[in-house]
C-alpha cells in the first residue's frame, strides 16, 4: 500500500480559488489532522477525494491507481461529513447491510457495541434521527466499514461532551485493533491534539503546514522578554503570533531560531502548547506559508 | 461482464425502483377506488352495475406503469448520493441503471400488455399488429407487438433519463423555473400544432403523408400506387439507434453530476 | 489507576516514557507485573496508540519493560533496582560531584564536608 497521493490539485468556485495547487499525501495506518478555519478549503479537498466533486486540475491516486471514477479505489475509502447521503426513509440497520454489500464486509459486532454505547436505535429510519444522532449514526458506519482510508469532516460537531469522549475512546480502540488511516478535518483543535500523528493546515486555498506533530513541537518556540530586547532577538524569524504578558512581550515563532544571535539574559525561549500553536498557525495566510 | 459491485448496484436499484413504483401505483389505485366510490354515489341505480363492471378496465395500469417508469428514469440525485457514499462511481451507476431500466421496461410492458389483453376485450387490436405485422400469424403479431412496445418505451426511457440528468445539472435556484418554463413552452407549442392540424381538412392523413415523405425510410413505411407498405426492420433499427444515443447522452450528463454542498 | 498528566509542550511519547518510569520507581507497578496496554492508555487519555507505543519502547530499550508475546507489556525483573541504581548515579553526578566542586572552592576538606552532612541529616 502506498497511500493516497494528491498532486497539483486546484479548484475554483465562481472564479475564486478554493484550492490552489495542493499536493499532499496520506500514508497508510496513520492518523492525520486536517486543520484550518471554516471555509479554508478542507471540506472541498475531502469532497474531491471522495469523488463528490471534480477538481479543475490535478491528479489523485490511491495505492498508485487512479482515484477518480474508479470503483476499486473508491471502495477503499469512506468520507463522513455533514451532508447526508443516505436515503431518509432507510433504517439504519438496512444501511449497514447495504454498506456490507458495497464494501465487501461490515463489522456488525462492533456496530452493535457502538450502538449500545451511544444508545442509538438501529431500527430507526435515518431521516428520523436528531442532529446529534445523525452524526453518531454516520460515525458508527465510518468506524465499522472495512475501508483503509477514513475521512471524517468535523466528526464531533453537534455532539455533547459525553458522546465526544465516547467517540475519541472508540477511535483509539478501533485504531489499535485494526490500524488504518484516519483523516480528521476540523477547526476544533483542542480535544484531538494528542490523537494526531501528522498535521496539515489548509489556509486560504493552500497547504501552509504539512508535518509530523513531533516536528511541529520541536519547531515551536515562545520567546519572552522585555519589549525591546525580545523584538530585536526575533528579528528575521518566522513570527506567527504575539502576546503581551504584563510588561513582557511574547513572540510565537515557528521554525529555526537564529543560532548566531546572542540570547540576552532577560529573554527566555520556552516551549509552546501545541493547541495554542495550531491556533496561530491556522490563522497564518496562504501567501507566506509557515514552513521555514 | 458484471462485477459483484455491479450486482449490488442492480439489486439496490431494482429494489428502490420497485418500491417507488409500488408506492406510486398504490396511491393512484387508492385515488381510483375513491373516485369510483364517489362516482357510484353520484349515479343512478341503473348506472351502477356498469360502473362496477368497468372498475378494472377504467384503471389504466399500462399507462400508469409507463408513467412510473418515466419518473424513475428521470430522477438521479438521491441514487447518486447513496451510491457515492458507498464507493460506487457514476460510470457504474449509469451502466447498471440502464440494465435495470431495460429489464424494468421488459417486465412492465409485459404486465401492461397482459393487463390490457385480459381486462379490455379490444386488447389485441394493436396498431402495430394491423400495420407492420399484417398478414403474420397471431403468435408473431403478439411477440412483434410486444417487442415494438418495449423498444419504443426503452427509447423514451433513455431520453427522459437524459433530460432528467440535464435538469439535475441546473443550478438549484433556477431549476424549478427553467423546468417550468420548458414544460409550459412545450405545452403551448404542442397545443398550437395540434389545433392547427385539427383545423385542416383531411388533417390526419395529410400529417401521415408528410411523416411518410420525410421519415419513411427510418419508419419502414413507403407509398406505392395508392397503398402503404410497412417494413418492420427499419423502425426497429431506428429505435435501437435512438435508444443507444439516449443512453450515451445520459452517460455524458451523469458523469457531470456532483454532490450539492452547503457552501 | 493511572495518574498521568499530559501537557502539550513536551513530546507525548517522552511524557509517556517518563511517567511510566516514575510509576515503576514509586512501585505503583512492581517488578514482573503487567502495565496497562497501549490501547488502554490511548483510550483513557485520548492519545494516539503509536505514540504510546513509542514511549513504551524507550523503556523496553532501557530494559525496564519487556513485551511478552500474547500477554502484553510487563515490568522486567530487577527494573526497580536498575532504576534505583541509575537515579543514585544521577544523584551522585548532579549533586555530589557539584557539591564537592563547590566545597573545594570554599577550601573545605573531606572531614569538613562530612561534618556538614551530619549536621544536615540530624
Image (spheres, coloured by chain):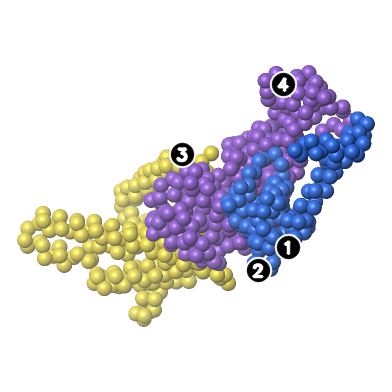
Chain colours: A purple, B yellow, C blue
Report the Cα–Cα distance between label 2 and label 3.
63 Å
In this rendering, does residue C91 appear at all? yes
Q: Residue at x 70, y 49 (%)?
A: C22
Disc 2/disc 4 C-alpha distance (Å) = 55 Å
- Name the residue that disc number 1 marks: C77
Splitting the image into 4 quarters, where does residue C54 fall? Answer: bottom right
* Discs 1/2, front: 1
Label 3's element?
Answer: helix
Q: Is residue A86 visible?
A: no
Mark 1 to mark 3 CA distance (whole Å): 76 Å
Using the image, name the chain to which the residue with label 3 belongs. B
Residue A92 locus on image (x, y percent): 43, 58
Callout 1: helix, strand or loop?
A: loop
The residue labelled by disc 3 is: B174
Q: Nearer the viewer, mark 1 or mark 4?
A: 1
x 34%, y 50%: residue: B194
Who is closer to the viewer here, A1 or B205?
A: A1
User: Few, some or many C-alpha atoms within 10 Å of disc 4 (few <14, some 14-19, many ≥20)?
Assistant: some
Find the residue positioned furthest to the left. Answer: B45
Residue B242 place in picture, x, y as percent:
50, 61
Q: Tag 2, which chain?
A: C
Q: Is residue A54 above or below residue B10?
A: above
Q: Are marks 2 and 3 on the same chain?
A: no
Q: In front: mark 1 or mark 3?
A: 1
Q: Do tags 1 and 4 sit on the same chain?
A: no
Specify the quadrant of the image occupied by residue C40: bottom right
Mark 4, residue position: A248
Amino acid at each position: 500500500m502506498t497511500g493516497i497521493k494528491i498532486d497539483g490539485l486546484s479548484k475554483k468556485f465562481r472564479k475564486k480559488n478554493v484550492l490552489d495547487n495542493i499536493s499532499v499525501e496520506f500514508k497508510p495506518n496513520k492518523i492525520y489532522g486536517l486543520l484550518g478555519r471554516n471555509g479554508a478549503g478542507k471540506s472541498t479537498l475531502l469532497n474531491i477525494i471522495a469523488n463528490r466533486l471534480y477538481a479543475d486540475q490535478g491528479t489523485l491516486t490511491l495505492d498508485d491507481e487512479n482515484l477518480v471514477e474508479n470503483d476499486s479505489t473508491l471502495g477503499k475509502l469512506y468520507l463522513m461529513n455533514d451532508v447526508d447521503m443516505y436515503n431518509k426513509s432507510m433504517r439504519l440497520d438496512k444501511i449497514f447491510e447495504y454498506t456490507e454489500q458495497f464494501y465487501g464486509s461490515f463489522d456488525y459486532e462492533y456496530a452493535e457495541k457502538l450502538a449500545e454505547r451511544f444508545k442509538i436505535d438501529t431500527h430507526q429510519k435515518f431521516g428520523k434521527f436528531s442532529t446529534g444522532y445523525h452524526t453518531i449514526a454516520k460515525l458508527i458506519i465510518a468506524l465499522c466499514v472495512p475501508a483503509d482510508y477514513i475521512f471524517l469532516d468535523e466528526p464531533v460537531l453537534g455532539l455533547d461532551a459525553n458522546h465526544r469522549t465516547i467517540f475519541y475512546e472508540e477511535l483509539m480502540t478501533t485504531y489499535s485493533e485494526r490500524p488504518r488511516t484516519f483523516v480528521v478535518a476540523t477547526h476544533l483543535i483542542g480535544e484531538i491534539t494528542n490523537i494526531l500523528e501528522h498535521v496539515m493546515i489548509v489556509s486560504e486555498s493552500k497547504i501552509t503546514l504539512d508535518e509530523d506533530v513531533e516536528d511541529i513541537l520541536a519547531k515551536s518556540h515562545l520567546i519572552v522578554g522585555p519589549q525591546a530586547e525580545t523584538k530585536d532577538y526575533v528579528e528575521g524569524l518566522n513570527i506567527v503570533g504575539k502576546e503581551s504578558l504584563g510588561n513582557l512581550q511574547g513572540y510565537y515563532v515557528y521554525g529555526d531560531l537564529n543560532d548566531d544571535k546572542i540570547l540576552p539574559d532577560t529573554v527566555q525561549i520556552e516551549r509552546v502548547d501545541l493547541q495554542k500553536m495550531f491556533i496561530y498557525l491556522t490563522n497564518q495566510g496562504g501567501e507566506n506559508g509557515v514552513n521555514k | 461482464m458484471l462485477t459483484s459491485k455491479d450486482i449490488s448496484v442492480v439489486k439496490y436499484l431494482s429494489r428502490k425502483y420497485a418500491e417507488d413504483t409500488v408506492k406510486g401505483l398504490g396511491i393512484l389505485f387508492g385515488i381510483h377506488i375513491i373516485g369510483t366510490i364517489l362516482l357510484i354515489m353520484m349515479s343512478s341505480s341503473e348506472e351502477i352495475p356498469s360502473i362496477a363492471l368497468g372498475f378494472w378496465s377504467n384503471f389504466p395500469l399500462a399507462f400508469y406503469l409507463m408513467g412510473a417508469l418515466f419518473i424513475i428514469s428521470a430522477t438521479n440525485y438521491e441514487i447518486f448520493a447513496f451510491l457515492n457514499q458507498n464507493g460506487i462511481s457514476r460510470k457504474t451507476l449509469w451502466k447498471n441503471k440502464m440494465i435495470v431500466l431495460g429489464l424494468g421496461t421488459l417486465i412492465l410492458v409485459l404486465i401492461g400488455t397482459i393487463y390490457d389483453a385480459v381486462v379490455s376485450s379490444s386488447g389485441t387490436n394493436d396498431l402495430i399488429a394491423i400495420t407492420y405485422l399484417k398478414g403474420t400469424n397471431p403468435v408473431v403479431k403478439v411477440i412483434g407487438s410486444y417487442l415494438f412496445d418495449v423498444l419504443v418505451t426503452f427509447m423514451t426511457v433513455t431520453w427522459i433519463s437524459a433530460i432528467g440528468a440535464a435538469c439535475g445539472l441546473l443550478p438549484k435556484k433556477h431549476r424549478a423555473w427553467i423546468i417550468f418554463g420548458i414544460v409550459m413552452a412545450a405545452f403551448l407549442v404542442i397545443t398550437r400544432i395540434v389545433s392547427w392540424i385539427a383545423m385542416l381538412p383531411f388533417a390526419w392523413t395529410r400529417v401521415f403523408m408528410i411523416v411518410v415523405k420525410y421519415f419513411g425510410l427510418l419508419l419502414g413505411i413507403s407509398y406505392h400506387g395508392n397503398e402503404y407498405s410497412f417494413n418492420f426492420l427499419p423502425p426497429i433499427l431506428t429505435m435501437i439507434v435512438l435508444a443507444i444515443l439516449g443512453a450515451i447522452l445520459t452517460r455524458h450528463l451523469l458523469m457531470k453530476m456532483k454532490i450539492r454542498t452547503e457552501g | 489507576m493511572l495518574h498521568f498528566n499530559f501537557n502539550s509542550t513536551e513530546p507525548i511519547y517522552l511524557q509517556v516514557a517518563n511517567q511510566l518510569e516514575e510509576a515503576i520507581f514509586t512501585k505503583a507497578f512492581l517488578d514482573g507485573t503487567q502495565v496497562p496496554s497501549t490501547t488502554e492508555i490511548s483510550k483513557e487519555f485520548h492519545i494516539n496508540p503509536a505514540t504510546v507505543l513509542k514511549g513504551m519502547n524507550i523503556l523496553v530499550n532501557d530494559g525496564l519493560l519487556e513485551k511478552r508475546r500474547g500477554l502484553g507489556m510487563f515490568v522486567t525483573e530487577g527494573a526497580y533496582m536498575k532504576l534505583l541504581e541509575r537515579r543514585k548515579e544521577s544523584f551522585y553526578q548532579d549533586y555530589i560531584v557539584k557539591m564537592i566542586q563547590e566545597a573545594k572552592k570554599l577550601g573545605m576538606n573531606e572531614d569538613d564536608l562530612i561534618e556538614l552532612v551530619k549536621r544536615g541529616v540530624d
